[in-house]
Image: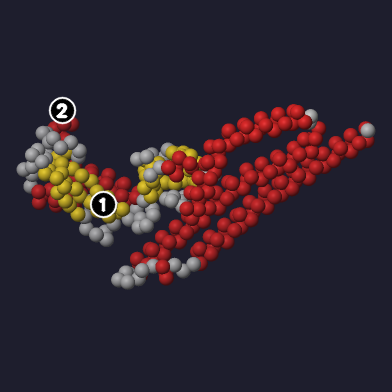
Amino acid sequence: MLETLTTNLEFKHVYLLVVSSLSLLLLLRGLFIIQLAKSKRLKAIKKMDYSEAVTTHEESDEDDDGQLLLNKRRAVQSVETRFEFMRRFYIPLVLFMSIVLLVIPFLPTLPATYLSLLTGLVAGVIGFAAKPVIENAIAGMVLTFSQPIRINDTVIIDDKYGTVEKINLLHTVIKIWNWRRLVVPNNKLLEKEIINLTLGDETEWAYISFHIEPDADINLVKDIAKKSMDSKYRDDSEDPSFWIMEMKTDSILCWVAGWASDPASSWALKSAARKNLITALNENGIKFQMANTNITVSPIDLVKS
């Protein structure tokens, strides 16, 4: 009997060693295959010619080159998103399977009653605890393959402007404009309305609105507003535009807008335009406000008071 016990112990030790070694080998081999497939896919994308998908009618060679680079960048983002999700899903899957295999030899030594209670308890705990995990994991798969957002996409979620930094198995990380990280569970993300500023054309229409007094020289205001959009952040493909949006007894609502090459440039353009506009209107003695329609005094007078 002692020999049998010794043999069983030796078998379990060997079994644990073999399963641990094979699990580690499987983990490393799988990660290597995923990384190799990702590298091959990225190399293939760099060699691809997207010229057939680019509209060339009445467009310059420079426009075609820009569209080609944009298409390639989006393809790279798509590949990185999918393979990152595969890597994050593969690691816990292998670990879970390894743990299950490691405990199998020890199950027969437990009494049937304890084994049943233990199995029921574990199943209940896992079922209760895994519900949000499973929901988020499934949502992560949906996000990965349907791709409403991708890594490096510029988005607006819950009125927060930022860039998609990571799409993990259970959550997505958004780097918002102040460099803080917004972490959103994947199942919640699927339920939210997302403005993806990167889908389609990345150029963005940047506008600012302001109110002027009714007796202001509107032509002078128009010239000042359009000149305020002169900035290194503006796309020169089209001149700025000016509109009168609303007329009231105590104010006139005006808009001025220009194109920016991307969402980040649009953000910077609006900031620069507001600064230029405030400076120019003050220099010309035009009373204005950026939001309140009740114009009584100029911003300079408000600051002095």
Residue occupying the point 30% across, 71% down: 58
Which residue matches tag 2? Answer: 305
For badge 1, the amino acid type reads Ser
The answer to whether 186 appears left or right of 224 in the picture is: right
Q: Nearer the viewer, residue 86 or 128?
A: 128
Numbered mark located on residue 30 in the image: none
Task: Establish if 169 lies above or below 106.
Answer: below
Q: How is the image coloured?
A: secondary structure
Q: Choose between 73 and 189: the one closer to the eye.
A: 189
User: Is residue 193 depicted above or below 71 in this figure?
Assistant: above
Q: Residue at x 26, y 52 (%)?
A: 231
Whether pointer 1 and pointer 2 mark residues with C-beta atoms closer than 8 Å, the reply is no
Question: Along the polypeptide, which appears first: circle 1 or circle 2?
Answer: 1
Name the residue: 35% across, 49% down: 264
Near-viewer residue (230 or 247): 247
Residues 295 and 132: in front is 132
Three-letter residue code for mark 2: Ser
Q: Is residue 34 visible?
A: yes
> Label 2: few (<14), some or many (≥20) within 10 Å?
few
Circle 1 SS class: loop
Q: Is residue 282 visible?
A: no
* C-alpha separation, residue under disc 1 versus residue under disc 2: 32 Å
Q: Quadrant of the C terminus?
A: top left
Label 1 Cα crowd, 10 Å radius (few <14 / some 14-19 / many 20+): some
Q: Indicate left or right for 13 with 293 as reference.
A: right
Residue 187 is situated, as x and y percent measured from the top left of the image, at 48, 41
Q: Report the number of numbered marks.
A: 2
Q: Quadrant of the N terminus?
A: top right
Quarter-of-image position of residue 134: top right
* Residue occupied by mark 1: 231
Residue 115 x/y as whole percent: 74, 31
